[in-house]
C-alpha cells in the first residue's frame, strides 16, 4: 500500500486553515493509504515559545486529530520528539543540504525578517531539513499539505534526490548495502480548494496561528458565539452581493460575461474579490456542497444572508468535533496509549531507514 505522512505544529490553536488545508483531507486518505500523522513539537521550538505550554499544546493537537476523524485503527498518530530518528536523520541530511537552499526558503525569509537576525535561532534556518527528515524516514509516496508548504516539499524532494545520488546505488552496494535509492522521492498532495485559507480581516494574507489578531482566524475550538462574532465582523468587499464572482465561474451566456467585465472595470482595484472567494470556499468545504451547488445557492444573496448561512454551516460542522475533542482530552490514559502505539510503529519504519542511511554514508556500525 502507498504511504502518506503529514503533521501540524502544536503552536497556538489549530485553525480552519490547518483543518481545511490539511487535517480534513487526511481523513479520507486514511481509507486508501497507509497513513502516519505526527504532531511536530520539535518544529514548535524554532521561534520563541513558552515551555510551560508545549506539552499541553502537543496533547491538544493529538486530541484534535482524533476528534476530526483520524481513526487509529487505520492511521498511526504520534509525537515527533518521541521518535528519535527524526533528529538523528536531520543531522545526517544537514551535511548534504547547501545553506543556499535554506536561505531561499520564503518562510525563513519572512519569519526571520519579522524577528530580526539576533533573535532568530539556527533551528529556524534548518527547519526544512527536519521537515525533510520527518518525511524521508517513512519512505512515503505522498504528503498532504496546504500550499504554504509547497516550497518545503520541493526542498525535501531535491534533498532526497541529492542523497540518493551522493550515497545511493553502486556506492551503497560496495559498502554492503542493498544499493538503489536510499530515499523514495515523495509528491505533495495539495487540495484543489482550501489549500490557502485566507485571514478573515485581510483577504491578501493567509490565515495563520501567529497573526496577532484572533479575529483573523476561526479556531477549531472556538465556541459558537466567537464564530458568529468573527464572521459578522470579517472583511467583505464593496461589490453588490455575491453575484459578480459567480458570473466569472458560470458557464454563462455572453451577456453575463460582458456584464461581469463591466463590473470588473468598475472595480478595477479589487478585481478578484479575495474575501468573497475565501468565504465561499470555506462555506463550500464545511457544508460539503460542490462549487456549483454553492454558486447556485448563493448567487442571489447579500452579505448579511450569506454570513448567517456561513456561521450556521461552520457551527454545525465544528460542533461535533468540539464534543469529541472534550471526550478525548479528558481521557488522558487513552491518549497516552494511542501516542505510545503510534510512536512504536513509526520507530520501526524510521529506524530501518536511518540504519540504511548510516550504512550508505559509511559509518562504522555497532
Ligand atoms: P503548520 O503547522 O504551519 O500547518 C499545518 C498544516 O496546515 C496547513 N496550513 C494551511 N492550509 C490552508 N490555509 C492556511 N491558511 C493554512 N495554514 C496552514 C499547512 O500547509 C500544513 O499542511 N512545517 C509544517 C509542519 C510539518 C510537516 C512535516 C508537514 C513538519 N514536518 C512533514 C508535513 C510533513 C508546518 O509548519 O505546518
Image (cartoon, rainbow, N blue to C red):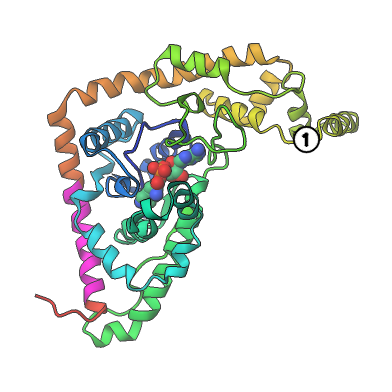
Q: Rate crowding at label 1 as few (under 14), some (14 to 19) or many (20 or more) other CA atoms within 10 Å.
A: few
Residue visible at 13% across and 77% down in the picture: 365
Q: Can you say whether 196 is above or below 262 in the image?
A: below
Q: Can you say whether 99 is above or below 69 in the image?
A: below
Q: Secondary structure at mark 1?
A: loop
Q: Residue furthest front?
A: 118
Q: Specify the segment rendered in magenta.
A: 343-358
Q: Is residue 37 magenta?
A: no
Give the quarter the ligand 1 occupies. Answer: top left
Q: Can you say whether 309 is above or below 346 in the image?
A: above
- Name the quarter where the N terminus is drawn: bottom left
Left or right: 39 as drawn, with respect to 106: left
In the image, the residue with mark 1 has its CB under 8 Å from the nearest atom of ligand 1: no
Q: Residue furthest left?
A: 366
Q: Position of residue 160 (x, y in %)?
A: 39, 68
Q: Position of residue 185 (x, y in %)?
A: 42, 65
Residue visible at 22% across and 77% down in the picture: 359
Circle 1 residue: 269
Residue visible at 22% across and 39% down in the picture: 51
Residue visible at 40% across and 37% down in the picture: 23
Depth check: give the residue in front, 263 or 360. Answer: 263
Instruction: State which quadrant residue 18 falls in.
Output: top left
Depth check: give the residue in front, 40 or 210. Answer: 210
Left or right: 37 as drawn, with respect to 297: left
Does residue 22 appear anywhere in the picture?
Answer: yes
Left or right: 363 as drawn, with respect to 9: left
Q: Position of residue 212 (x, y in %)?
A: 45, 31
Q: Position of residue 215 (x, y in %)?
A: 49, 23
Depth check: give the residue in front, 276 or 206. Answer: 206
Q: Is residue 344 magenta?
A: yes
- Name the quarter where the C terminus is drawn: bottom left
Amino acid at each position: 500500500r502507498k504511504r502518506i505522512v503529514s503533521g501540524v505544529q502544536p503552536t497556538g490553536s489549530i485553525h480552519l486553515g490547518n483543518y481545511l488545508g490539511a487535517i480534513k483531507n487526511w481523513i479520507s486518505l486514511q481509507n486508501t493509504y497507509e497513513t502516519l500523522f505526527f504532531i511536530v513539537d520539535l518544529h514548535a521550538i524554532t521561534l520563541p515559545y513558552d515551555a510551560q505550554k508545549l506539552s499541553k499544546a502537543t496533547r491538544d493537537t493529538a486530541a484534535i486529530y482524533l476528534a476530526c476523524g483520524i481513526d487509529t485503527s487505520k492511521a498511526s498518530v504520534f509525537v515527533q520528539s518521541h521518535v528519535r530518528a527524526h533528529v538523528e536523520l536531520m543531522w545526517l541530511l544537514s551535511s548534504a543540504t547547501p545553506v543556499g537552499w535554506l536561505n531561499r526558503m520564503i518562510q525563513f525569509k519572512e519569519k526571520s525578517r519579522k524577528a530580526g537576525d539576533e533573535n532568530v535561532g539556527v533551528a529556524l534556518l534548518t527547519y526544512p531539513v527536519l521537515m525533510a527528515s520527518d518525511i524521508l524516514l517513512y519512505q512515503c509516496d505522498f504528503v498532504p499539505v496546504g500550499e504554504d508548504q509547497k516550497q518545503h516539499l520541493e526542498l525535501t524532494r531535491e534533498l532526497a534526490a541529492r542523497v540518493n545520488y551522493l550515497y545511493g546505488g553502486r556506492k551503497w552496494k560496495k559498502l554492503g548495502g542493498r544499493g538503489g535509492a536510499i530515499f523514495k522521492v515523495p509528491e505533495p498532495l495539495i487540495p484543489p480548494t482550501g489549500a490557502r485559507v485566507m485571514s478573515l480581516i485581510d483577504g491578501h494574507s493567509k490565515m495563520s496561528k501567529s497573526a496577532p489578531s484572533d479575529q483573523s482566524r476561526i479556531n477549531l475550538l472556538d465556541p459558537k458565539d466567537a464564530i458568529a462574532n468573527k464572521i459578522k465582523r470579517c472583511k467583505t468587499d464593496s461589490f453588490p452581493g455575491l453575484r459578480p464572482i459567480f458570473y466569472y465561474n458560470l458557464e454563462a451566456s455572453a451577456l453575463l460575461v460582458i456584464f461581469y467585465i463591466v463590473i470588473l472595470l468598475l472595480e478595477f482595484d479589487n478585481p478578484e474579490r479575495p474575501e468573497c472567494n475565501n468565504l465561499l470556499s470555506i462555506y463550500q468545504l464545511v457544508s460539503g456542497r460542490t462549487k456549483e451547488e454553492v454558486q447556485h445557492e448563493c448567487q442571489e444573496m447579500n452579505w448579511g444572508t450569506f454570513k448567517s448561512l456561513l456561521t450556521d454551516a461552520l457551527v454545525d460542522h465544528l460542533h461535533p468535533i468540539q464534543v469529541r475533542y472534550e471526550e478525548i482530552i479528558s481521557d488522558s490514559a487513552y491518549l497516552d496509549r494511542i501516542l505510545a502505539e503510534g510512536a512504536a510503529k513509526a520507530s520501526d519504519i524510521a529506524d530501518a531507514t536511518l540504519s540504511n542511511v548510516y550504512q550508505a554514508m559509511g559509518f562504522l556500525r555497532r
